[in-house]
Image (cartoon, grey):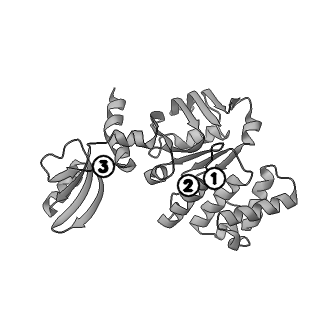
Amino acid sequence: MQITINNLNKVYKNGNHAIKNIELEIPSGMFGLLGPNGAGKSTLMRILVTLMKPSSGQVKVDGLDLLKNRRQIRSMLGYLPQDFSFFSKLKTYEFLDYAARLAGMKSASKRRQAVDQMLEEVGLFEARDRNANKLSGGMKRRLGIAQALINEPKIIIVDEPTTGLDPEERIRFRNLLSTISTTDVIIILSTHIVGDISSTCHNMALLNKGQLAFAGSPEELVKQAEGSVWLIKATEAEYLEINEKFPVISTIPAEGGWEIQVVADEINGYYGEQIEPNLEHAYVHFMENKLNQWSNS
């Protein structure tokens, strides 16, 4: 299973390029799509799930053309949009049953079995008779992924799935996606939260201003930040200076001052040591350096 994107563009009537000349291959497994708000991630997602037509370019899903084989590709899709909402009068199990019917499940008994099994898997069986719009934020996102998975799709696309969730719900959500990630299923996780990518995805792409800035493994992106991440031991007087001069990743109170992680090629005389970068460091490093060079070239 593979998605191949060639020279994909979406231009709005006002001339704004939402995405521009995207060339990308998305293999089976968990694939992270990372970028700041407004980078073009949601536009690309909407094209991939056939809700929006591109201005030009081609997308092939396992050899099928996205524009010519829309119905066949739609039957392979599960989608959780960022602005996922519910019919206010439907109970949790009724909503999921409705989603199963939309996905093409005609047999009532098969739907009942699939609905109960999916509610168990996402931890919502106890809330099956509760109105869907009365669920907590985390439970709503779990119901959202349940409706995306109900027809056992080969391609699952989730857009900003953990925004607004507490840390426990975010971990639960990521673990749920990881358990269904197999060699014959593509899961695309579109997010601006770096931790969602680093803990789950073997491959990723970084979008910025509608263009593809990076494609590869998280490890490859991290490697680019080696030698540019520092742990500075700062006094109270230095604290504000450092925040003004460098991109700060974290700040921890320490005896007599602060321990501050920054991304920089040099720390200009402050007392600190280089540390191993993680994906969050690498993302900030890339956005601060590579993208500035790229946009000015």
Residue 53 appears in the rendering: yes
Query: Which badge, 2 or 3, is on the more N-terminal residue?
Result: 2
The Cα atoms of the two marked residues, 2 and 3, are separated by 28 Å
Q: Amino acid at mark 3?
A: Glu
Q: Amino acid at mark 1?
A: Ile
Residue under pointer 3: 276
Q: Residues within 10 Å of mark 2 (few under 14, many from 20)?
A: many
Q: On the rendered image, what quadrant is the C terminus found in? A: top left
* Residue lying at 15% horizontally and 68% vertically, measured from the top left: 256
Viewer-side residue, 60 vs 224: 224
Residue 155 lies left or right of residue 112; in this view the side is left
The image shows residue 88 at horizontal and vertical percentages of 71, 65
Residue under pointer 2: 161
Vertical placement of 23 versus 239: above or below? above
CB within 8 Å, label 3 to label 1: no
Q: Residues within 10 Å of mark 3 (few under 14, many from 20)?
A: some
Query: Which badge, 3 or 1, is on the more N-terminal residue?
Result: 1
Residue 230 lies left or right of residue 36; in this view the side is left
Viewer-side residue, 60 vs 130: 60
Residue under pointer 1: 180
Q: On the rendered image, what quadrant is the N terminus found in? A: top right
The image shows residue 30 at horizontal and vertical percentages of 56, 46
Q: Secondary structure at mark 2?
A: loop
